[in-house]
Image (cartoon, rainbow, N blue to C red):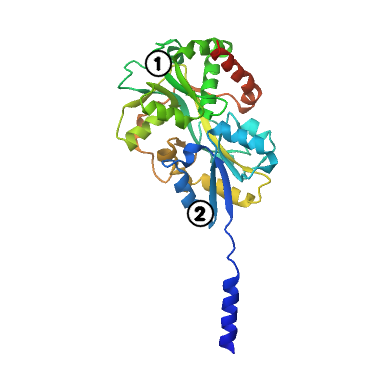
């Protein structure tokens, strides 16, 4: 009788479906989850730790992520948004979708004091013009050199309406030229080969030899040095200074997986996440790593001056500055 009862109990238990794992939906940008990006390794490390599942949703570049979030509003499927930067945080916070991260802001190791209770940084770097040293022997030494240089030597840029690097360059131009930024854009327009929706498209065109320059980061040469054992591609140091990008993540307040989202943000500030940033996202880590950075990072351009608008100023003026850019390039 006991044997029959045990058999029935075993069959009954087998018929009960296993509890589904929690799934964390993370909106991010394309290159983060590309074949060579950090997404896959971060997913593996976090899923092992949490016994859950990460669903990456790639939405182009950083500005495109915010645009998608604003379009979806309260119906968004995101639990975490990863890949905005400080140029977008005030506008993102104004949507009312984000909640407090619950972490100590002092955990952030970035070049500016961090006090934001909504967003936490996961990496940073300065924007830079990357040039091909085999085809360009005299790279620009300043933003002014770039604006007024030889129109035959082209640069590939990104669209500030969809791309965080594109927006960063627009703000770099504004920080240096102020009220004369429109005039500077008109001059620069003769050197622009194309403006792509995002960073990935621009850098791919550059490495295919379509132009000798591209907008990227001071950290980009580290990729070529480490992954390709090449010093062909270099960053130009600009005397006016370089604009800083700090990339951030935040959680959606209405998410049904908010506790898991908080756990992910805490994990983001640990070596399990940060170890993947230098040689997968090719940026500088915003929290401790388990080992020192590779030696190639010691050879990078280190800007003497950092340029950065406050999130509030960008939020208030971004539309007007984009209109200024559009009008200048239409001339």
Give percent across and percent down for residue 140: 39, 16
Secondary structure beneath disc 2? Answer: helix
| Of pointers 2 and 1, the one earlier in the residue sequence | 2
Q: Determine crowd level at label 2: few under 14, some 14-19, many 20+ residues with C-alpha closer than 10 A.
A: some
Residue at the image position 31 percent from the left and 17 percent from the top: 137
Q: Does 328 appear above or below 201? A: above
**Quadrant hosting residue 216:** top left
Residue 85 shows in this picture: no
Residue at the image position 66 percent from the left and 35 percent from the top: 71
Q: Which residue is mark 2?
A: 47
Q: Does 312 appear above or below 183? A: below
Q: Does 272 appear above or below 200? A: below
Give percent across and percent down for residue 194: 46, 21
Disc marking residue 264: none
Residue at the image position 51 percent from the left and 29 percent from the top: 245
Give percent across and percent down for residue 328: 56, 13
**Quadrant hosting residue 313:** top right
Q: Determine crowd level at label 1: few under 14, some 14-19, many 20+ residues with C-alpha closer than 10 A.
A: some
Residue 37 shows in this picture: yes
Q: Look at the numbered discs 2 and 1 and tell me whether their residues touch, using CB distance below 8 Å.
A: no
**Quadrant hosting residue 98:** top right
Horizontal side of 200 relative to 136 (left or right) equals: right
**Depth order, front residue of 213/109:** 213
Q: Quadrant of the C terminus?
A: top right
Secondary structure beneath disc 1? Answer: loop
**Depth order, front residue of 131/218:** 131
Give percent across and percent down for residue 295: 34, 36
**Depth order, front residue of 140/241:** 140
Horizontal side of 189 relative to 133 (left or right) equals: right
Q: Which residue is mark 1?
A: 141
Q: CA distance from mark 2 to mark 1?
A: 46 Å
């Amino acid at each position: 009788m006991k044997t029959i009862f045990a058999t029935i109990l075993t069959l009954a238990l087998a018929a009960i479906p296993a509890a589904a794992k929690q799934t964390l939906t993370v909106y991010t940008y394309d290159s983060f989850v590309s074949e060579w990006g950090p997404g896959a390794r971060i997913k593996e490390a976090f899923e092992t730790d949490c016994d859950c599942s990460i669903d990456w949703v790639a939405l182009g570049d950083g500005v495109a992520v915010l645009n998608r979030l604003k379009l979806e509003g309260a119906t968004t499927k995101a639990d975490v948004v990863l890949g905005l930067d400080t140029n977008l945080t005030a506008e993102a916070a104004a949507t009312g979708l984000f909640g407090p991260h619950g972490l100590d802001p002092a955990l952030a190791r970035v070049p500016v004091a961090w006090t934001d209770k909504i967003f936490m940084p996961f990496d940073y770097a300065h924007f830079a013009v990357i040039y091909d040293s085999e085809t360009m022997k005299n790279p620009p030494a300043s933003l002014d050199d770039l604006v007024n240089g030889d129109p035959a030597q082209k640069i590939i840029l990104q669209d500030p309406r969809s791309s965080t690097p594109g927006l960063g360059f627009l703000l770099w131009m504004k920080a240096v030229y102020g009220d004369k930024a429109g005039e500077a854009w008109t001059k620069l327009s003769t050197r622009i080969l194309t403006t792509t929706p995002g960073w990935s498209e621009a850098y791919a065109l550059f490495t295919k030899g379509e132009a000798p320059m591209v907008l990227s980061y001071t950290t980009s040469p580290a990729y070529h040095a480490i992954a390709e054992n090449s010093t062909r591609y270099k960053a130009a140091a600009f005397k006016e200074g370089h604009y800083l990008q700090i990339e951030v993540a935040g959680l959606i307040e209405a998410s049904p997986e908010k506790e898991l989202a908080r756990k992910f943000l805490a994990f983001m500030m640990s070596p399990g996440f940060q170890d993947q940033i230098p040689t997968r996202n090719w940026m500088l880590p915003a929290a401790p790593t388990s080992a020192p950075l590779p030696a190639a990072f010691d050879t990078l351009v280190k800007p003497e001056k950092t340029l950065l608008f406050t999130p509030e100023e960008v939020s208030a003026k971004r539309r007007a500055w984009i209109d200024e850019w559009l009008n200048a390039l239409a001339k």
